[in-house]
Image: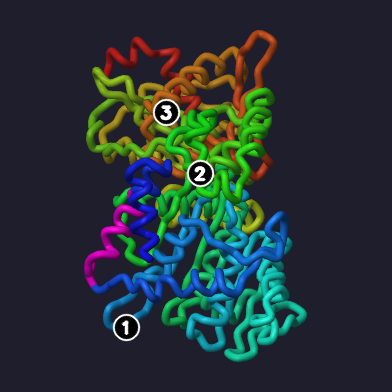
Amino acid sequence: MNYIVQYNDLLQRGEIPASRRVKAVYARLAADTNSIRGSYIFDEARANRPIDFIERFCKHSKGEWAGQGIRLELFQKAYIQALYGFVDVETGLRQYRESFFLVGRKNGKSTLLAGLALYMLTSDSEGGAEVYSTATKYAQARLLFDEAHNMIKQSPDLSKHFRKRKTDLYYMPTMSKFQPLSRNSDSLDGLNASFVIMDELHGVRDRNLYEVMRQSQAARRQPLLIMITTAGTVRECIFDDMYSYAAQVADGTITDEHFLPVLYELDDRAEWTDPAAWIKANPALDSIKKRDDLTAKVERAKQNRSELSGVLCKEFNVRETVKTAWLSFDDINNEAAFDLEDFRGGYCIGGVDLSITTDLTCASLLLMKRGDDKKYITQMYWLPADRLQERVQQDKIPYDKWHERGLLRLCVGNSISYSDVTQWFYEIINEYELFPAWVYYDSYSARYFVDEMQMQGLNMVRCIQGAKTLSLPMQMLGTDLQAHKVIYNNNPVLKWCLTNTGIQTDRNGNIVPVKNQSPRQRIDGAAALLDCYVGLYEHYAEYTAAI
């Protein structure tokens, strides 16, 4: 049975509601099962082996089905066939080596992956297989491990070949093992992983865990790494990177023949109140996942908005900022791009948020075009070079990756050199012949920076950081972000800063920005952008007449 084609037919006819990305991926997979595409073919017999294994040998260990044999759902069978059925026509090796599987909680992921882990241990023709379940916390990594162990104990056919050791499950016929690992495990070196499951990726803030596990598979002929997760609050962690990559592969904007994205999510945030759309993020709804339970959670979220963020993230895979955030992720997210060359010789407004050692320093330029109400933003960030690795390790934020991409610069020593900030303004002004009519700055620690900037001929304006000055410009900025009129070249640092920004409201309804998460989360990029908006608010007529 070709479950991919069967599932796709139901998706395309609308009999099973699904996200546009799920429909797009399965449309391509279904087409590929019926044709030779490049060097890969679909081997239905190979595709069905893991399905047959799970349904023959594995049993439920918990709940109302405890002790009963597993009967996989159609969406699970289609996914398994996609992972295992496409093989190289010459070598017979699997096509897909990595998969990102986004699904709401309580949709049978633990049962599915525990079954696949046992298949990879016993039946994948891999001598000395090493299977790992990984997560940020060891307790999370153990959930899949314990599920697999319970399946073994309930199966006479499996249990006679397995031995439970101190830290792993050992499959004696092929000397293979299954072990849970976390980022705090004693050693992640020396692994030779054949199958890796990264559970709840949204909680993995340290990208190193992913990199180490992926590198550990380098010696295997057909390794497989599955990232399975719900959405989470956005912190520019590995989840955000991998989700973005998976979305682009699903959309067809990136081609990666070894990467399989399956994104069960709502197409629109507003769908969370539409029961007919819930299955888009919950493919096991009405079978494994109970509709009554989900209905109750939605109703509570409608009455208590403090619960909304959790429901959106965990039940519907709507990427959200934290509960106290100023704006939603959908408000902030904008992947539109522009070229500074289009603004050559134009006027702009600058904004600077300064720091000394810990926070980021950020410089921003806001540009507009005549007859266009969009705002175009370019930024640069700085950190002290001596503190880079400390910040990466302690904050678990990819400052090093941003530096490699040219989004962040390093100042020599252990503090910020404001001369480096002045130099950036000088470079960009001269390269593109731009003229910052005003540069707004937070007076904190400004001192000689202002003098240096004025020596370059720039008009420096002190920006008082209070409600009287910031409230209306911040409201303007919020409105523009929600309307997707702020084009910032999809800068991940600014996006991260915006998601970290909360608001404090006084009794008169005035608002000011505040950090809405831990002190490790920065808002400096948002603050620098807001300084630009203060300048735009105070000089709107003058500026728009000049451009």
User: Closer to the observer: label 1 or label 2?
Assistant: 2
| Left or right: residue 39 compared with residue 79 | left
First in sequence: mark 3 or mark 2? 2
The amino acid sitting under disc 1 is: Thr
Q: Nearer the viewer, residue 428 or 176?
A: 176
The residue at which mark 1 appears reads as 91
- Chain part drawn in magenta: 24-38
The residue at which mark 2 appears reads as 281
Residue found 68% across the figure and 66% down from its top = 147
Residue 83 percent location from the top left of the image: 42, 67
Residue 381 percent location from the top left of the image: 48, 43
Would residue 18 be seen by someone viewing this image from the given angle?
Answer: no
Mark 3, secondary structure of its residue? strand
The amino acid sitting under disc 2 is: Ala
User: Image quadrant of residue 438?
Assistant: top left
Mark 2, secondary structure of its residue? loop
Residue found 46% across the figure and 56% down from its top = 74
Residue 271 percent location from the top left of the image: 48, 31
